[in-house]
Amino acid sequence: MQNLDTYIHSLSEKNIAPEVLATYNSLDIPNKKMEDWKFRDTQDWFQGAYNFSPASILTSRDVKDSIADISYDALLVFENGLYKSDFSQPQHIQLEDRKKSSETDFVNKLEVANEICAQDGARIHVSNSESSQHILIASFYSGADTYAFQKNTVYIESGSQLTITEIHISLSNSVRVNHALTIHTEEHSSCEYTTVHSLHNDAQFIQHVRIQQEAESKATYATFPVSGKYIRSWVQVDKVGEQAHTHLNGLFFPILKEHCEQYIFVNHLSPSCETHKLYKGLANDSGFGVFSGKVYVARDAQQTNAVQTNKNILLSDTAKIHSKPQLEIYADDVSCSHGSTTGQIDKDALWYMQSRGIAYAEAIQLLLSGFINDVVQTVSIESVRERIRTAIVHKL
């Protein structure tokens, strides 16, 4: 058991680029004085005592029970960030070795820690694939006071397509996960990546996602933090080629004392690109949610089309959701809009349904099922849609 600083400095210097280690040492621990961290202090992520190398407990039964209802063409299984070949079915997927980066353009200290500590992850390279296949990544986390790192990398060559679903599953309560994902889409390529979090009520998860798009590519990223004590997703999309289209979707539903944060940033750096964001939130009991979305349009990114929508419903007097939509535009030939609403269940609609003989509880469930449906429907794989819908309806 040791804290993160001690663990990092115990690693061999041969495995850490000097520039990256210097960046880690120079950055402050994310804290409430920082705008994007004002709702959660992360001192405990760095100073608490954790087990960074827990023994494996994953069984074939765990894997089977967790993904039994999901269809896939290939399966990659990880436990605490390490690839488990005995449970995986990679088929013809091209997997690459983990490559450490010397890049220093990290957003915060936690992202640098992932770059230093992540030993493994799904590293997928797709070429010459005109027909899309569905890869399922099952990422399990286990052990007492475990601190796990995982970094996934997806590279889609020109003209290729790929659909990926990653399900994060905790087998024990006291786990913390530092996860990173990088997606690169070349010209005329397409990638759909869906993330589902099914974690225990004491598990905590922080994720950094970077997406880079070249000309006429399409990227769809959706996140569904179904359960977990604390789940934070930070997503940045850089459009470096013309006519790159992006769809970003998410649905969060914190209940009891769950805490969920979504930070979504899109940089329009080239002309004639489109972005469509749709994020919805529900909160019950003392659940706490955050949505922060920003669209940046550079001076040369003319004919940009960007729509950002966030809608939230509070189901109790003690639930809270903070929404912060933003636009930063330097081009003059653009169509950009954003909207945000937070309220309660429509009482008139509820009364109307009850007046037609629908019971109160059933009426609420029908209204909320309708509220979440357009986000869930953005997932193309039917079995994944049903997995998400079932989990959300169960929380209702």
Image (tube, helix red, strand yellow):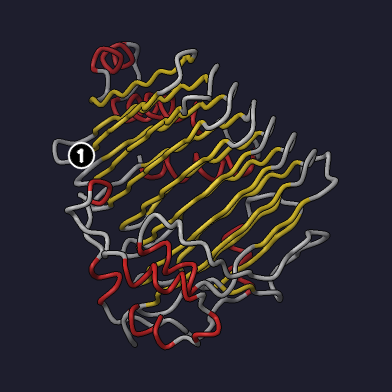
Residue 360 in the image: x percent, y percent? Answer: 28, 26
Residue 103 in the image: x percent, y percent? Answer: 52, 62
Near-viewer residue (322 or 355):
322
Q: Residues within 10 Å of mark 1 (few under 14, many from 20)?
A: many
Q: Is residue 330 left or right of residue 28?
A: right
Quadrant of the image containing the N terminus: bottom left
Most extreme residue toward the left, as rendered?
317
Residue 229 in the image: x percent, y percent? Answer: 31, 58
What residue sits 59% from the left and 71% below the top? 120
Quadrant of the image containing the C terminus: top left
Judging by the rendered image, the residue that carries numbered circle 1 is: 320
Query: Compared to 24, does 92 lie above or below?
Result: above
Query: Compared to 80, does 362 lie above or below?
Result: above
What residue sits 24% from the left and 50% below the top? 256
Near-viewer residue (242 or 380):
242
Near-viewer residue (14 or 396):
14
Q: Is residue 371 left or right of residue 269?
A: left
Tell me the kind of residue under disc 1.
Lys
Q: Is residue 151 left or right of residue 41?
A: right
What residue sits 17% from the left and 53% below the top? 33
